[in-house]
Amino acid sequence: RQSPSQRPMYGLGSGFIIDSAGIVVTNNHVIEGADEITIIMFDQEEYKAELLGRDPKADLAVLKIDQEDEVPSMEIGNSDNLKIGDIVLAIGNPYGLGKSVSMGIVSATGREFNNPYSDYIQTDASINMGNSGGALIDTSGRLIGINTFIRSSSGGSEGIGLAIPSVTVLGIINDLIQFGEVKRGWLGF
């Protein structure tokens, strides 16, 4: 019998393919502390993934799946064009149930929540445990955000969902792919 410290730990989250070469984006907190990362696709095909880079400050991570053929990737939309009331869909893996989509609206944009590196999109689309790292898309199927966390008074899944805007995601993941980290400017006065 194994003691609790010897048993393997498993994390669960979501992600999406942003480039047909097998580049996957998720939240940093989904993969943080992982020794091994396995990505299970929609068709249940499994791939080992390599961590290309992560940014704990913005809670983003970029992975590369080990595959030979090109894979379908998401079209990227412009989150700067979002308006309050726009319909959005949160795609993910809530509670490990997989292949889940919930619909809501954009409730607000520019939410800060103690993170100077991202102004979040607020939505009432359900973002539950396991949805972190999944795509928030518009009604044309374009990525407009990455589901990140729930703001809740009880700590449960009820509350407001928050997503990192696609414009922020693109800037950060380009650095993560190229350098493995984000290069931020700094001025001291």
Image (spheres, rainbow, N blue to C red):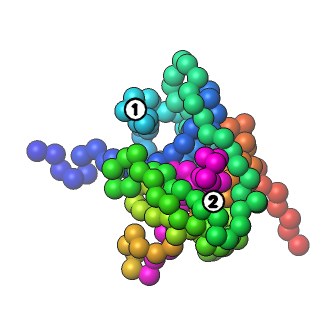
Picture coordinates of residue 30, whole percent (x, y): 47, 51
Quarter of the image for residue 108 reads: bottom right
The extreme top residue here reads 68
Question: Which residue is depicted at the point 56% across and 27% down?
Answer: 71
**Helix, strand, or loop for circle 2?**
strand
Q: Position of residue 132 (x, y in %)?
A: 48, 56
**Where residue 43 is drawn, which disc sits there?**
1
Q: Which residues are magenta?
A: 134-153
Residue name at image x 61 percent, y 73 percent: 107
Name the residue located 38 percent from the left edge and 72 percent from the top edge.
Answer: 156
Q: Residue at x 64, y 70 (%)?
A: 85
Closer to the camera in the image, 38 or 69: 69
Residue type at the position of mark 2: Ile
* Magenta span contains residue 114: no
Question: Looking at the image, which is closer to me, 36 or 162?
Answer: 162
Which one is in front, 31 or 118?
A: 118
- Mark on residue 164? 2
32 relative to 142 in the view: left or right? left
